[in-house]
Image (tube, helix red, strand yellow):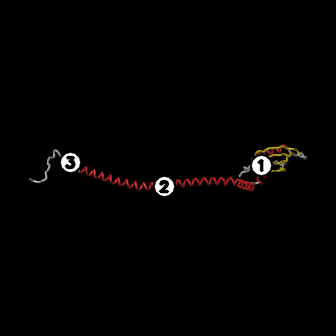
């Protein structure tokens, strides 16, 4: 007997198939899957660590922002407290500056230009208001009622406001003495 290998030559029951193409495609797919899995693991490790660092940085920034907000609130409260405590001094200094910069010659020139020829001012009491205007109580001596009315019209034309006449009387020489008040608002 012969121990020779048996050749199965019956191709009808078991035909030979060419499976090399499918085997190569499966190997390539498995290789591609391994490469993609490796890249995924690499990206997860790299960007996962970076995401943790960014999250820690964001937490630190949030803490710094809240500390800065608290500091802003504290400083705002300090500024408001300083404003309240020094408001009286600021008002005093502003009042002094206002009085120093006020043009008295401009006011007196306006009054002189408003006076009719034969009239004159016998007393003048100015006072500053909070808005920077000057209120004045004055006594004007005129020769007639028409001169007093002309003076009031001239004051109105020159921008004097709140002109009020309190009363008038005749002097011994027949002149009219008129008590009045008015407001002068200067242009800054």
Give the residue at x 87% y 44%. 169
**Among the 4 quarters of the image, the one containing residue 165:** top right
* Labels 3, 1: front one: 3
Going from the N terminus, do you reach mark 3 or mark 1 first?
3
Q: CA distance from mark 3 to mark 1?
A: 119 Å
Q: Which mark is residue 135?
A: 1
Instruction: Please tell me how crowded label 3 is: few (under 14), some (14-19), or many (20+) other residues with Cα within 10 Å.
Output: few
What is the spatial separation of the Cα atoms under label 2 and label 3, in whole angstroms?
60 Å
Q: Between residues 28 and 122, which one lies in front from this camera angle?
A: 28
Q: Residue at x 43, y 56 (%)?
A: 49
In the image, taking residue 45 as reference, residue 21 lies left or right, namely left
Q: Secondary structure at mark 1?
A: strand
Name the residue rendered at 68%, 52% in the picture: 84
Q: Nearer the viewer, residue 109 or 139?
A: 139
Residue beneath disc 2: 56
Q: Which residue is mark 3?
A: 17
Residue contact between numbered discs 2 and 3, judged by CB atoms under 8 Å: no
Mark before the other along the chain sequence, 2 or 3? 3
Is the residue marked by circle 1 packed among few (<14), some (14-19), or many (20+) residues within 10 Å? many
Choose mark 2 or mark 3, whichever is in front: 2
x and y percentages locating residue 174 in the rendered image: 89, 45
> Does dot 2 land on a helix, a strand or a loop?
helix
Residue 90 is situated, as x and y percent measured from the top left of the image, at: 70, 55
In the rendering, which numbered label is found on residue 112?
none
Disc 3 is placed on an element classified as: loop
The CA distance from mark 1 to mark 2 is 67 Å
Between 148 and 16, the one nearer to me in the picture: 16
Task: Please provide percent x and percent y for residue 137.
Answer: 81, 48
The residue lying furthest to the right in this view is 172
């Amino acid at each position: 007997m012969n121990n020779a290998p048996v050749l199965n030559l019956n191709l009808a029951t078991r035909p030979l198939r060419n499976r090399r193409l499918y085997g190569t495609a499966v190997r390539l797919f498995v290789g591609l899957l391994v490469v993609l899995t490796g890249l995924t693991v690499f990206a997860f490790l790299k960007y996962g660590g970076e995401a943790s660092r960014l999250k820690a940085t964001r937490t630190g920034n949030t803490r710094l922002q809240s500390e800065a907000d608290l500091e802003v609130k504290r400083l705002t409260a300090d500024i408001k407290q300083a404003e309240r405590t020094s408001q009286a001094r600021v008002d005093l200094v502003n009042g002094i500056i206002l009085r120093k910069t006020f043009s008295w010659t401009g006011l007196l020139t306006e009054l002189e230009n408003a006076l009719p020829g034969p009239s004159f001012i016998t007393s003048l009491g100015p006072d500053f208001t909070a808005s920077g205007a000057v209120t004045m109580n004055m006594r004007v001596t005129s020769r007639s009622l028409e001169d007093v009315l002309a003076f009031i019209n001239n004051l109105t034309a020159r921008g004097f406001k709140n002109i009020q006449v309190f009363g008038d009387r005749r002097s011994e020489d027949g002149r009219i003495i008129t008590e009045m008040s008015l407001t002068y608002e200067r242009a800054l």
